[in-house]
Image (cartoon, rainbow, N blue to C red):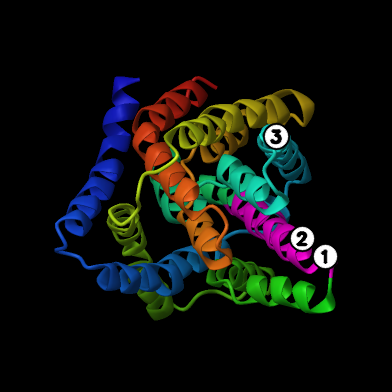
Amino acid sequence: MLAIFLKTLPFFALISLGYWAGRTRFFSEEATSYLTKFVFYFALSAMLFRFSANLSLANVLNWRLVGGYLWGTAFVYGIATAVAFVRKLDVPTAAMEAQCAVIGNVGFLGAPMLVLLLGEQAIGPVILVLAVDLIVFSSLIVILITGTRDGQLSILMLRTVGLGLLRNPMIVAISSGLVWSALAIPIPEPMNEFLAILGGAATPGALFAIGASLASKSAGQVQIALWLSFCKLGLHPFFVAIAVLYLFPIDAYTAGVVISAAALPVAGNVYMLAQHYDVAPHRASTAILFSTVFSIATVSLVIAWVGQF
């Protein structure tokens, strides 16, 4: 456990450094925004494209993995939604709480950290987890919020969801990389070096950006945030583990990667959605803050546990 904690510590130290920079205003909110854009649109996209272009779609696509992760995630989503309805929350707020309970920081934190900790072969399972989060659950919350407000599903809403997916640079990078791989086109050496250099900025840039963005998050509704953090850091990896180990069994290594990805803290884009639709932004903000702090210990515990596989 101590060895794993010491391996994960540098990642969280980078987040802490970013938090300090944001908290002391050494990095303004505008600077953090531009750093996030650089990582999101350039560095992380380069890293994901390079990894995907060196993968085979046949080797990446694992329907048992998709089924197991989807089952475990949907189960926790249902628990969070049920608890929200018991508290008599409306559909948009319940959907936002459920989103906090299951959507982890797989893109900014998981992809760089798990690949470095568990090996480059972890990128395949991480890509599938990221795809399920983006395609299924990020679409679902938009449908639930806009559908409830409009009173019905509309072609315009579905168009918005579709365009959102097509414009997401992570989806574009992964899809383009897999197409490149399927065409069996070798990556020219100068292009590979370019992608490696640019993608190398993804890990420190993403972690620093996470910390800097946390500095602007306000804490509110602490009890709810603690409950959502428990869902994300405890219930989510637990039920995903049940799914990928027993209900939809996959090989031990892949299962360990998926469980580790499920143990990641709440993703920052959940707050962006909450702010955009003006649905519970304060509780989303606090859940991100709390879950990230607690994950310093919990992620190490989970990775140490799956390492026994």
Residue annotated with mark 1: 151
Please state which of residues 57 and 141 is positioned toward the viewer in this rendering.
141
What residue type is disc 3 on?
A: Gly
Label pair 1/2, CB-CB below 8 angstroms = yes
Percent from the top left, x then y, of residue 235?
59, 28
Relative height, residue 155 to residue 49 (above, below): below
In the picture provided, is 124 more to the left or to the right than 38? right
Residue annotated with mark 3: 72
Mark 1 closeness class: few <14, some 14–19, many ≥20 residues within 10 Å: few
Real-space Cα separation, disc 1 to disc 2, in angstroms: 5 Å
Mark 2 residue element: helix
Mark 3 closeness class: few <14, some 14–19, many ≥20 residues within 10 Å: many
Q: Is residue 255 visible?
A: yes
First reached walking from the N terminus: tag 3 or tag 2: 3
At x 69%, y 31%, the residue is 244
Please state which of residues 24 and 278 is positioned toward the viewer in this rendering.
278
First reached walking from the N terminus: tag 1 or tag 3: 3
Residue annotated with mark 2: 148
Does the magenta-highlighted stretch encompass residue 128? Answer: yes
What residue type is disc 2 on?
A: Thr
Mark 1 residue element: loop
Real-space Cα separation, disc 1 to disc 3, in angstroms: 29 Å
Kindly report which numbered mark, 1 or 3, lies closer to the viewer in this rendering. 1
Percent from the top left, x then y, of residue 185?
60, 76
The residue range painted magenta reads 127-153
What residue type is disc 1 on?
A: Gly
Kindly report which numbered mark, 3 or 2, lies closer to the viewer in this rendering. 2
Percent from the top left, x then y, of residue 270?
53, 55
At x 46%, y 79%, the residue is 188
At x 70%, y 34%, the residue is 72
In the picture provided, is 118 more to the left or to the right than 5? right
**Residue 292: quarter of image:** top left
